[in-house]
Image (cartoon, rainbow, N blue to C red):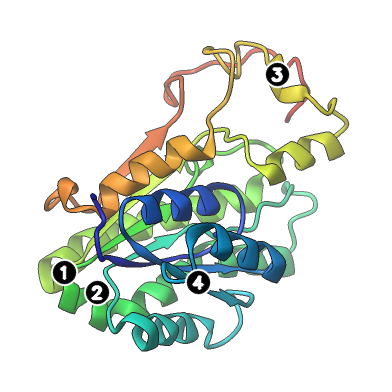
Amino acid sequence: MRLKNKVIIITGSTMGIGKAIAIKFVSEGAKVIIHGLEKELAENLRKMLGIENCIFHIEDLSNSGCSDRLVSLAIKKWNKIDGIVNNAAMVINSNIDNTDEKLLNQVLKVNTFTPFFLIKSALPYLTKSKGSVLNIGSVNASSGEPNLLAYSISKGALMTMTRNLGDSLNRKNNVRVNQINPGWVLTEKEVERKKNHGLKHDWYKNLPNIYAPSGRILLPEEIASLATYWLSDESGPVSGQVIDLEQYPMIGRNISKDPLNLT
């Protein structure tokens, strides 16, 4: 087992990518702290994974002290922390016309500040275990869709933080920090989000190859497989790296038409 006996906090793990990561990690021998806003979903996931393998904490991560409470829960239950997956994120449509100070502050707080403060809260324990942090970003960090302005800004900032801490913490604390930037992923929320935008209920089954050259978009389980590598000892001393997960090059790609009117 690649994560045997490792204790890992996974934020935003009651659904989507975070849930897939929790399932994969437990299958690889880890103990996980599930976090999210949906108590019923967390309870169902805990039953699926086995109550001996996980505990959960339901709270808005941007609440003052939430990071400390997550860390305390892990230490009280298993007396160590080997890793963190910062997956929780706020995805909201915005552009320069409708992005005001309140919205931008809110998105940055959830998507950028809370990962930083969770790392800071857990750092003494990660230092002791020579642990690993994985931030889940987005390919939108490179520039972003026109209507994902605030989200893209927050993920760009997260990417800079990953590279900075990935260097400084690896030198000083033997704690590695890396990031995955997924492209378009078929999560429950994404299915509903695109339906709310007016697309058909099965919009993901017949995507133009301009978006999905392989005929489909990424699955949460595929993100979870790479996440396992970064939290395992297999990734060795590698730190401060940001990996794009998409089926086409992010640099030099030219979308001249938008057949689904996604932007």
**Kind of residue sitting beneath label 4:** Thr
Quarter of the image for the C terminus: give it: top right
**Kind of residue sitting beneath label 1:** Lys
Q: Sequence-wise, which precedes: disc 3 or disc 1?
A: 1
- The answer to the question of whether label 2 and label 1 lie on touching residues, with beta carbons closer than 8 A, is yes
In the image, 262: left or right of 242? right
- Quarter of the figure with residue 222: top left
Name the residue carrying label 1: 130
Task: In the rendered view, tell whether residue 111 sits above or below residue 57.
Answer: above
Is any atom of residue 101 visible in this view?
no
Distance from the alpha carbon under mark 4 to that under mark 3: 35 Å
Distance from the alpha carbon under mark 3 to that under mark 2: 42 Å
Looking at the picture, how far across and down is residue 15, in whole percent?
Answer: 62, 53
Name the residue carrying label 4: 114
**Kind of residue sitting beneath label 2:** Leu
Name the residue carrying label 2: 126
Name the residue carrying label 3: 205
The secondary structure type at the circle numbered 2 is helix
Distance from the alpha carbon under mark 4 to that under mark 2: 17 Å
> What residue is rendered at 49% in x and 70% in y?
51
Q: Nearer the viewer, residue 222 or 49?
A: 49
Task: Check disc 4: other Cα within 10 Å, few if <14, some if 14-19, many if 20+.
Answer: many
Looking at the picture, how far across and down is residue 107, in whole percent?
Answer: 63, 62
Q: Sequence-wise, which precedes: disc 3 or disc 2?
A: 2
> What residue is rendered at 40% in x and 60% in y?
85
Q: Nearer the viewer, residue 140 or 239?
A: 239
Mark 4 or 2: in front is 2
